[in-house]
Amino acid sequence: MAASKGSTLASISARWLASQGRKLSTTATGLKKEGAAVVQEGQKFEMERRFTTEDVASYVSLCGDTNPIHTCDSAAQSAGFQGRVVQGMLYAGLFPAVIGSNFDGAVYVSQTLNFRTPVLVGDDLCAEVEVIAVKKLRHHYRVTFATHCFKKGDPAVVVGGEAVALLPV
Amino acid sequence: MAASKGSTLASISARWLASQGRKLSTTATGLKKEGAAVVQEGQKFEMERRFTTEDVASYVSLCGDTNPIHTCDSAAQSAGFQGRVVQGMLYAGLFPAVIGSNFDGAVYVSQTLNFRTPVLVGDDLCAEVEVIAVKKLRHHYRVTFATHCFKKGDPAVVVGGEAVALLPV
């Protein structure tokens, strides 16, 4: 399935479905579960998570990041950290998880990420997404979310940014 | 460790190290392995990876994304896909892995991601990062990378964007 320049996952998916005589909205409706959220500006959704040494090691196996600050206490301490560092893209993965868990059929379009504070193994995290813009299109909503992740009890953002997703109408 | 507004992981790390009488460059040098790359504009680094059903299930456990298009053939097909869809943030994790594997001591600062084409379980992927700007700072390089991921044999970008990382001097 080749993508033309400037195509997005959403447009590709829509064309793919159209080639089968279907629409993105059909897909979304087909997957939408009872009680799924109805999108509105100002809504917030969150997920809490603590990553363990086993989680971090598992993610190393998945993505191949050999940076020892993630897997070795002495390397992490030599690098100035108080413990093993959780990979940024691992906890950033909580954002699509929050969105996908609240809006079945969501198609993730984009994400920006600004990493600000190290996250260590055992830190209690809260990933929060807030609906900041909703655009009603023909077959779906194009929704922009502010995405922030905090350590519990600390207002400092460990990773911030924005995500855009297509959600079912 | 509270972060002031506008702080980055790099500045936090630098302050953290400074509080211990150390500098980021010391950290980086301490971790730098023999044969580590010397950063120059135009350099490209890549990593190949194929994600399996087990990988995708493992990532669901890690991040909590309950979207069934990742774990259920029939749900994926109902959604118009030819097979189970790999989570975008999973294969986007190849970018920091490429950077971290080539530059020990790298501190990841930011990443933008534009998802364009679905990736299915079993697709052969190639994640490529290219050095597009290098700024020499006092204790490290601030390096901007173009980040693109392709399916092998297909020039279409499945996810594109830019990453910024601090690398050892």
Image: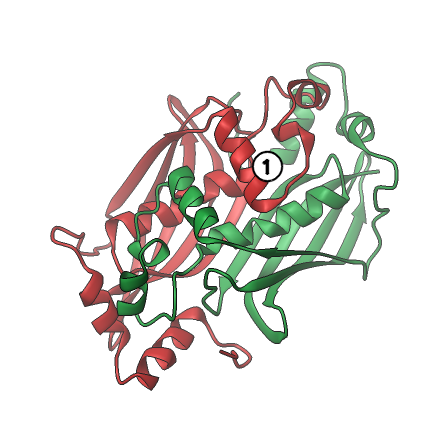
Chain colours: A red, B green
Name above or below for residue B148 compared with residue A68.
below
Q: Amino acid at mark 1?
A: Thr
Q: Visible in this render: residue A115?
A: no
**Viewed as shown, does residue A142 lie left or right of B132?**
left
Residue B168: name its quadrant.
top right
> Within 10 angstroms of label 1, few (less than 14), some, or many (20 or more) residues?
many
**Position in image of residue A61 (x %, y %):** 58, 40
**Viewed as shown, does residue A85 lie left or right of A129?**
right
Q: Residue at x 37, y 21 (%)?
A: A153
**Position in image of residue A68 (x %, y %):** 68, 30
Q: Give me the chain letter of mark 1.
A: B
Name above or below for residue A11 compared with residue A102.
below
**Position in image of residue B136 (x %, y %):** 82, 45
Residue in front for this viewpoint, B4 or A148: A148
* Quadrant the C terminus of chain A occupies: bottom left
Q: Residue at x 41, y 54 (%)?
A: A163
Q: Visible in this render: residue A65?
A: yes
Name of the residue lying farthest toward the top: B20
Residue in front for this viewpoint, A137 or A106: A106
Name of the residue lying farthest toward the left: A34
**Position in image of residue B135 (x %, y %):** 79, 49
Residue B132: name its quadrant.
bottom right
SS category of the residue bearing label 1: loop
**Circle 1 residue:** B8
